[in-house]
Amino acid sequence: MSSVSGTEKGAAQPRKKRRTGIEGRKARIGVLFTLPWILGLLIFYVYPLISSVYYSFTSYSIINPGSFVGLQNYKDLMQDKLFWKSIQNTLIFTGVSVPVNILLGIVIAMLLNAKIRGRGVYRTIFFIPTLVPVVATATVWRWLMNPNYGLFNNILGAFGLGPVPWLASTQWSKFSLVMIAAWGIGQAIVINLGGLQDISPEHYEAASIDGASAWQKATRITIPLLTPVIFYNVVMGVINALQTFTLPYALTGGEGSPTHSLTFYVMHLYNNAFGYMKMGYASAMAWILFLIILVLTLVIFRTSKKWVHYQQ
Amino acid sequence: MHSVRKPRNIGRVVIHLVLIALSVVFLLPFFWMLSTALKSESQIFVNPPVWFPRPMQWDNFKKAVEYIPFFKYMRNTTFVAIMDVLGTVIACPLAAYGLSRIEWKGRDALFFITIAVMMIPTEVTMVPSFILYNKLGLVGTYLPLYITSFFGGRPFMIFLLRQFFMNLPRDLEDAARIDGANELHIYAKIVLPLVVPGILTVALFRFMNSWNDFLGPLLYLSDEKMYTLSIGLQMFTTQYKTQWALLMAASLLITLPVIVIYFFVQKRFIEGITFSGIKG
């Protein structure tokens, strides 16, 4: 309460005037504290955003200032077979990988949420893969999935199965990538676990009194009350999956091989911008990606009203 | 009593069995990394595979760090990561403080913009940023890899820290204000010490991101002497054949520092991630 008397000190001046004085001072202080960030916004966001729009209408490259070409980049993109292929690859991967990760993340988190011994150890085991640099992840899995000498085919061979061509075939390459991505679901597990621990035990107690089975508790209480967290994971998962770059790039040395089955959208963008120096073209691609992300995020938000439940 | 407990125990055993099976799958890549790293050339390409190489070729680790200038790359990576963390822990708390503890006109607008730019995919700003750095003659230096941090250019970190500031008591700064302490003093001496956990979380996230970053160094570093580890790792495969044992040894060495850090500050990590997921 001393705060009130503090600002009330020296109340001789007319109230209105003093108020604007304080507000002016506060505004100055506010701006001063956020000044580095305001500058950062201008230099690293506003300027690049505006120039990106501009570049997308030009044939700019580092070596050649280019000229204004209007909508030509966007028109060219519509004719670019690899552009469509990369969209297809990215969407297929997103459509499979995100649900797989969400499902696996929920199941593992729910198992971990049972009051069992060694929970911390298990949690660590599932989390550690997310700490591995993506390039290292790529190298290990490339070795595990080596068609001739990889461990996977050896194990399958012992059961009389395979060999599976994994990353070497167009049919299997995306599936292989989904598997590798699933190795890194530790963050989602941790987030789910946090969400599970936020669910009030009263709900379960009430259900127990009513004689609910474990399955009923899981499907009627746990999952519905976890939906806000699942929602967060779906949104982040989709946004990240659409921007997949490092894993397929490192796996294929930037080639997207075999036959472009692993050429992801951002890889195609990167190759255009820094391989062929078509920076205007790449800028147009970036905006289309932004649009795709925006639309998908909005769609998910729209549907969320139907399936996301909040406690209380 | 007994009859109630028994099925529960069976349930627990089943849960353990499933978790153990999953753990084996999740740990297998690590085991195989280590196993391969310790193999001689002749043990790598054999069928059925050798699980436990005898004798273990610890020498491979020495060869791996000599095959590429590993320690030089490690120094480079550490330098970039530390600069990134330094910039972040200086600039982001300042912005987060200005967006939470001070009431001023424009604050909410600025916060809205901060959230909005979090949604913009990096690919959109990537090309024009590269062009800008190129004009400034900074391509080929480390600066583009961390300079954004000094301007608070990690909006998610600002967002995270802002939540920490918001959780502090309302009238925390008032007593000091009455005593006529200047705002910077209040910030540095009174408020900042209370959000040290948040700052540590943010520092950790940035360190990890920077250490693991691939695209940044790929874009901006061209001189082999300046490479970071994630780029350097590629050099094992640009040869006619892949040096699997050495590559695995190097991959383990790159991963190790991050895992060691994780074990020291595990709690911070888990808290930070949970926080971003639940409250975000």
Image (cartoon, grey):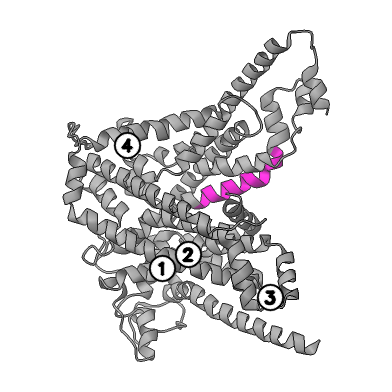
* Crowd around label 3: few <14 · some 14–19 · many ≥20 (10 Å): few
Residue A210, picture quadrant = bottom right
Q: Is residue B20 above or below residue A49?
A: below
Q: Residue at 23% across / 62% down in the picture? A: A260
In the image, farthest residue toward the top: A13
Residue A194 percent coordinates (x, y):
63, 60
Q: Amino acid at mark 2?
A: Gly
Residue B155 percent coordinates (x, y):
51, 40
Left/right of residue A20 with respect to residue B41 in the rendered view:
right
Q: Amino acid at mark 1?
A: Ile
Q: CA distance from mark 2 to mark 1?
A: 7 Å
- Image: magenta residue range: B193-208
Give the residue number, with chain letter if any, for mark 2.
A184
**Residue A180 circle label:** 1
Residue B182 percent coordinates (x, y):
70, 22
Marks 1 and 4 share the same chain: no
Label 1 near label 2: C-beta < 8 Å? yes
Q: Amino acid at mark 3?
A: Ile
Q: Amino acid at mark 4?
A: Pro
* Secondary element at image label 1: helix
* Secondary element at image label 3: loop
Q: Chain of mark 3?
A: A
Say which of A115 and A162 sits in front.
A115
Q: Residue at 64% across / 64% down in the picture? A: A196
Left/right of residue B181 with respect to residue B265 in the rendered view:
right
Give the residue number, with chain letter if any, for mark 4.
B128
